[in-house]
Image (tube, rainbow, N blue to C red):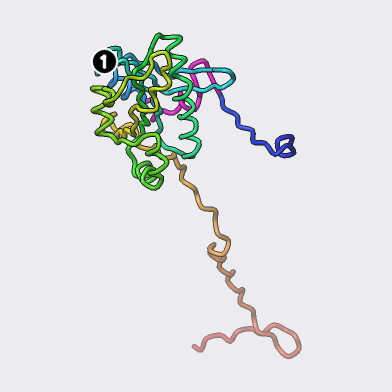
Amino acid sequence: MVADALDVRVSVDTWWRSGRIDHLLDRGHATLVEHVASTLRVAGWIVRVEVTFNEFGERGSADLVAWHPAERALLIIEVKTRIDDTQEATSTFSRKVRILPAILAREEGWDALTIGRVLVLADTRMNRALVRDHAATFDSIWPARTADVRRWVQRPRREPGPAPAVSKPSTAAQASFGGIWFVAAAAVGAKLRPVSRLRRPVTPSPDPAAAPSPEPAAATPTSPTTADGGTATPDAPAA
């Protein structure tokens, strides 16, 4: 292939008008997005779902972005039912945090004083083990955990210190909030349980070795022969 000859990696993502198709078809992902969006709206956030961007050739999609007018807080959220590649997840999210604040300030007028970075994960043993095993990597972007995230969502206050320059909203990300929000299945109606595959019953093929052997045919009785080759007549029973 051409890619092999040039020693390059080719990655293909399928897109639709509303974002990545694999996200739209993932029922667990959609359930998490709906739960988080509803929680944010109740807390006074303006929520946008599947926000796509294309800035100087850098393109992507954010699962959720939210704006808190009273606190002038911008929240960028990545939603995952599971993480297959930790490095890919962190690098992709960092690009969104770097690009989206300026775009949203320009297009929506959201000049943020603080920026929140939240990773929403289905609360499974596999996801918790992954976060625990790669704590240093996750903490570099999302140091807080569920309880702190939920408190911050309710009151997205800036940390004490001088306010960042409004003309450069992206600088707020350097001193902003970040955390992982584990969402339990019970919180979304237990819809995050994996769906097991439907397995069809398999009919075992007959084993020739186990097949019963046919019964031998009954032997046909033969009459004794005489010395000259004649057939002997059975003796009559004694009277």
Q: Is residue 156 above or below residue 227?
A: above
Give the quadrant of the N terminus.
top right
Residue drawn at the location 44% of the way across and 39% of the way down: 198
Query: Which residue carries the number 1 mark?
Result: 44
Q: Is residue 140 left or right of residue 208?
A: left
Is residue 184 rendered to the left or right of residue 108? left
Residue nearer the viewer, 45 or 235: 45
Corner quadrant of residue 37: top left
Badge 1 element: loop
Picture coordinates of residue 178, whole percent (x, y) = 35, 30
Crowding near the residue tagged with mark 1, few <14, some 14–19, many ≥20 C-alpha atoms within 10 Å? some
Q: In the image shown, does 165 or 235 lie closer to the viewer?
A: 165
Vertical order, 227 against 114 (above or below) = below
Q: Residue at x 46, y 35 (%)?
A: 90
Residue at image point 46% right, 16% down: 102
Q: 224 or 180: nearer the eye?
A: 180
Q: Is residue 236 magenta?
A: no
Identify the magenta region: 15-30
Q: Position of residue 95 (x, y in %)?
A: 49, 27
Q: Quadrant of residue 65?
A: top left
